[in-house]
Image (cartoon, grey):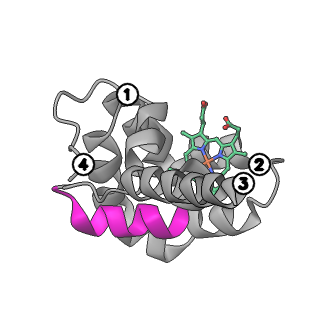
Amino acid sequence: MKIINIAIASILIVSISYAKNRGIHVVKEKEGQKYYLKECAKCHHSGKIGGNMATQEEWKELLENSAAKLIALHKGEENTTEVIRYLKSKRFEKEHNKLLKFLQEFANDSEDIPTCI
Ligand code: HEC
């Protein structure tokens, strides 16, 4: 009986902290967030963790020249064929500006990192 109670309590604690971690960020760049969640989040987690990989200037450099640097960083890594295909696509060209704005919003030198609600 005790063991079952402990098990139930642990499940509760785990699900509560999970829900907290998944708290939705109040972001300004909603379109860019959508692209990030679709193309990057499965490997780099939420914007708060993923955006933190670079400064605002570095994000600009990573995405310029058709994302040449970002593509190079993913070459040879596991399961990155799809994201490389995205970065080389016409869709990325269209989404570039908004995705960049979103990443810069969460950059590690951003003074205005959105908070969780
Ligand atoms: C299939 C998984 C996957 C996807 C999808 C993915 N990445 Fe990555 N990314 C990696 C791996 C693996 C590395 C190399 C190891 C590392 O540095 O974490 C990496 C490295 C990076 C780095 C360099 C990090 C550093 O510390 O130097 C950046 C920046 C980055 N990714 C941004 C992005 C962005 C932006 C997207 C979406 C357009 C994206 N990634 C999509 C797996 C992925």
Residue range (magenta): 28-39
Give the residue at mark 2. 75
Q: Nearer the viewer, mark 1 or mark 3?
A: 3
Residue 63 picture location, percent across and down:
46, 47
- Tell me the quadrant of the picture where the N terminus can be found: bottom right
Identity of the amino acid at label 4?
Answer: Cys
For the residue labelled by badge 3, is the local secondary structure a helix, a strand or a loop?
helix
Q: Quadrant of residue 73?
A: top right
In the image, residue 70 above or below residue 54: below
Residue 113 picture location, percent across and down:
23, 37
Identity of the amino acid at label 1?
Answer: Thr
For the residue labelled by badge 1, is the local secondary structure a helix, a strand or a loop?
loop
Q: Nearer the viewer, mark 2 or mark 3?
A: 3
Give the residue at mark 3. 3
Give how far apart the Cα atoms at labels 4 and 3 are. Answer: 35 Å
Q: Are marks 1 and 3 in contact (CB under 8 Å)?
A: no
